[in-house]
Image: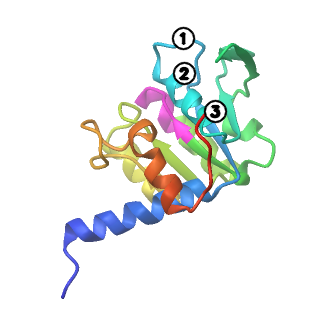
Amino acid sequence: MPVTRGQSRKFEMEAALRTFFSSPRFAVAGASSDPNKYGNKIFVWYLRHSLPATPINPRVPSVNILKSDHVTVPSPTALQDPSSYSLSVITPPAVTKQLLKEAKEAGIPAVWLQPGSFDNEILDYAKANFKAAIGGNGGDGSEGWCVLVDGEEGLRLAEREWSRL
């Protein structure tokens, strides 16, 4: 029985989720101290799942999340051993394009483009330049693939143990 386009897309995204969550560390571009912003909510998600995460924000030296200060790095190229990170992106599309170029240069293997962080051109660039790129239509949320909605499924697919704090 032939695989349908929908099944093919599902298998592709499952493979991308496994690759993304197989990284030993994670970075969150667009991390914010403001609990109303998704850059804060996404970073909290990593912390609550006991996953090592580094905030990326070139505008501030640290972000305060869950009553703790977390030192930021200004870009993916400033991460120590960038190839050991997967990158969640919560930046406006105009920022995301340059950010992805820096992530590629740094050797980051996998990116997750959160809803609102990309356009079709950026999504195509990510899919062409990273081992795994998650983003676009799909997932269990109404706005597309989002770590807040689909992250636990990715952890399960990667067979990654986690504890929810």
Give coordinates of residue 103: x percent, y percent: 62, 45
Judged left or right of residue 114, residue 87 is right
- Amino acid residing under circle 3: Leu
Residue tagged by mark 3?
A: 47
Give coordinates of residue 100: x percent, y percent: 54, 42
Work out whether mark 1 precedes mark 3 in sequence or the reverse, and give the earlier one.
1
Residue tagged by mark 2?
A: 40
Per the rendered image, the range of residues in magenta is 88-97
What is the residue that sits farthest to the right in this orientation? Answer: 80
Which of discs 1 and 3 lies nearer the camera? The answer is 3
Up-down relation of residue 70 to residue 139 (above or below) = above
What is the residue that sits farthest to the bottom in this orientation? Answer: 1
The C terminus: image quadrant: top right
Mark 1 and mark 2 residues within 8 Å of each other at the beta carbon: yes
Which is nearer the eye, 158 or 12?
Answer: 158
Up-down relation of residue 10 to residue 36 (above or below) = below
